[in-house]
Amino acid sequence: MNTGQAVTQELRQWIIAQAGAGVTAPALIAAMCKSGWSEDVAVDAIEQVLRVHLDQVARERGWPPAVPVPEPPLDDAPLFLDAGDRQVEVLMSMAAPRVVLFGGLLSDEECAALIDAARPRLQRSLTVKTDTGGSEVNKERTSNGMFFERGETPLIARLEERIARLVRWPVRNGEGLQILHYQPGAQYKPHYDYFDPAQAGTPRILARGGQRVATLVIYLNNPAKGGGTTFPDVHLEVAPRQGNAVFFSYERPHPSTRSLHGGAPVIEGEKWIATKWLREREFK
């Protein structure tokens, strides 16, 4: 940072106005860097200002309160993170919403092993039915999938430990790893991963471990065309490259988190992903 600069009231108002006008976090960071801020300090300033502003707006509007969320250790803008048994690249990070793209979370061999183990157990993917707490087939989600139990195999257990260390969140707070298979034309239209507090079935769902607070999508192969993970609110699309993973968190079950996301249609080839949802508390 330019040592003569500080987060003044004028800067706070500018950040809030720009964010309110739909300017993306990378564009805000670029503008601050152009005026002399270092990138890591600019990210911290934007994140702090928007968090305080959002908390104030949330109280005024009666939104659900914010809760702690998983957070990779990115304060020093590292290129690599220690995930225990593997060094993982940090390819991209966004502060608001919090989105981080990891490179090389899984090896090619690990990706292939997950696909092989999942393939015989695939069924039509379901979505949570929040009015009852059950699940249902939904036309918005046109993939096949299955769930592994937490720690079901040595590979699953090793991957769960790796994820827990990477995002600093307990293994016990994670749902079982889900494997999804998308064929040409298959997609998952934009949606939120948290459970809607207004729905009658949500208390039953939350009894198993509280709200979902973060998602990690791991790409297990390279589709020929299409199949990216989209974030419509911030005009971001992550390419589905084998072994990479996109992480995003959401501190309250509300659209203000801008965590709306979807799986773009596969145009050519097929797409395999592994999804890990993280809860507030131990998932049972």
Image (cartoon, helix red, strand yellow):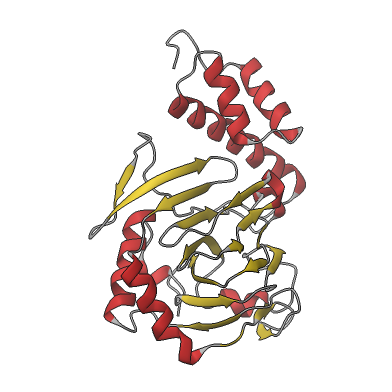
At a point 60% along the width and 58% down the height, the residue shown is 229
Seen from the viewer's position, the closer of residues 84 and 218 is 218
Quarter location, residue 145: bottom right
- The residue positioned farthest toward the left in the image shown: 85
Quarter location, residue 181: bottom right
At a point 28% along the width and 71% down the height, the residue shown is 158
Seen from the viewer's position, the closer of residues 174 and 132 is 174
- The residue positioned farthest toward the bottom in the image shown: 120
At a point 65% along the width and 15% down the height, the residue shown is 10
Where does the image place residue 218, in percent across and percent down from the top left?
46, 64
Question: Is 263 drawn above or below residue 83 in the view shown?
Answer: below
Where does the image place residue 27, in percent across and percent down from the top left?
62, 30
At a point 71% along the width and 51% down the height, the residue shown is 232
Where does the image place residue 191, in percent across and percent down from the top left?
70, 63
Question: Is 61 drawn above or below residue 191 in the view shown?
Answer: above
Residue 159 seen by the camera: yes
Residue 149 seen by the camera: no
Taking the image as shown, residue 34 lies to the left or right of residue 245, namely right
